[in-house]
């Protein structure tokens, strides 16, 4: 009985050792510069994006054609950056409780307020989309999955830096507010730009 138990333990140990060796072997680079996917906490693109969270964003895509997977990943990265910019605008504009978020509307009640709110959201999205157009891919990872499909990570970056991004966002927001409303809300461009930059730096 003891002999059988020892034999079983030897078989289990051999299986574990073999599995560990196989895991290390699966991460080797192939001739096409694509590595076999091995799950890890963060991909290098995700780590790279975290170095400049305000001006970088990362996305991932899957497909059996690597070009499609890259396109999906880039689209996801751009969508992520748009969301971050929109959130930064709304957060920075509501800090003083009487900013762009309120004065971009006419101040009317009921349906008119809802209409103006919708216009404000559209304007915020358009600003974000305009900023995202000035980004470029700065890092990419490609993996082959067990089913033969590709898993691609893409990191995009606003190349002029986060301060310039905040300045461009603030300028476009300023243009959305009429001269009269800007006077009412005591709009101070530099302070608003700083709030935008601070909000972008908080993004993860």
Image (cartoon, rainbow, N blue to C red):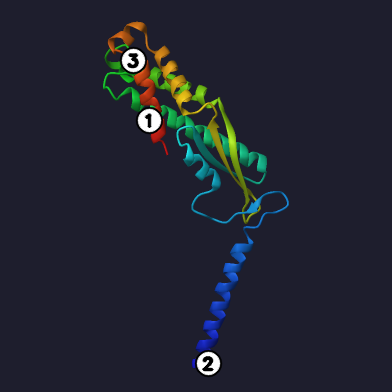
Check disc 2 and report the residue beneath it.
3
Q: Residue furthest top?
A: 180
Name the secondary structure under disc 2: helix
Q: Residue at x 57, y 56 (%)?
A: 38
Residue 73 position in % (x across, y down): 57, 39
Residue 92 position in % (x across, y down): 34, 25
Name the secondary structure under disc 1: helix
CA–CA distance between discs 1 and 3? 17 Å
Name the secondary structure under disc 3: loop
Q: Residue furthest right?
A: 31
Residue 27 lies in quadrant? bottom right
Q: Residue at x 42, y 22 (%)?
A: 124
CA–CA distance between discs 2 and 3? 83 Å
- Camera-near label (2 vs 1) is 1
State which quarter of the image contains the C terminus.
Answer: top left
Q: Nearer the viewer, residue 111 or 29?
A: 29
Badge 2 or badge 3: first in the primary sequence: 2
Q: Residue at x 37, y 24 (%)?
A: 194
Check disc 1 and report the residue beneath it.
199
Please tell me the numbered disc located at residue 188. Answer: 3
Q: Nearer the viewer, residue 126 or 131?
A: 131
Badge 1 or badge 3: first in the primary sequence: 3
Residue 187 position in % (x across, y down): 32, 14
Please tell me the numbered disc located at residue 17. Answer: none
- Mark 3 Cα within 10 Å, few/some/many (few <14, many 20+)? few
């Amino acid at each position: 009985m003891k002999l059988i138990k020892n034999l079983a333990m030897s078989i289990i140990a051999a299986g574990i050792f073999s599995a560990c060796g196989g895991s290390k072997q699966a991460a080797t680079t192939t001739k096409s510069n694509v590595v076999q996917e091995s799950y890890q906490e963060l991909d290098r693109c995700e780590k790279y994006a975290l170095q400049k969270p305000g001006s970088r964003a990362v996305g991932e895509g899957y497909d059996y054609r690597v070009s499609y997977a890259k396109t999906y990943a880039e689209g996801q990265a751009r969508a992520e950056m748009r969301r971050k910019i929109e959130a930064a605008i709304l957060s920075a504009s509501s800090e003083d409780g009487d900013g762009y978020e309120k004065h971009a509307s006419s101040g009317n009640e009921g349906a008119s307020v809802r209409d103006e709110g919708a216009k404000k959201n559209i304007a915020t999205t358009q600003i974000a989309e305009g900023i995202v157009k000035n980004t470029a891919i700065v890092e990419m990872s490609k993996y082959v999955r067990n089913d033969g499909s590709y898993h691609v990570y893409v990191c995009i970056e606003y190349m002029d830096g986060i301060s310039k991004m905040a300045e461009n966002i603030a300028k476009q927001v300023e243009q959305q507010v009429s001269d009269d409303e800007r006077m009412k809300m005591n709009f101070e461009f530099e302070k608003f730009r700083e709030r935008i930059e601070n909000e972008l730096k908080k993004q993860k």
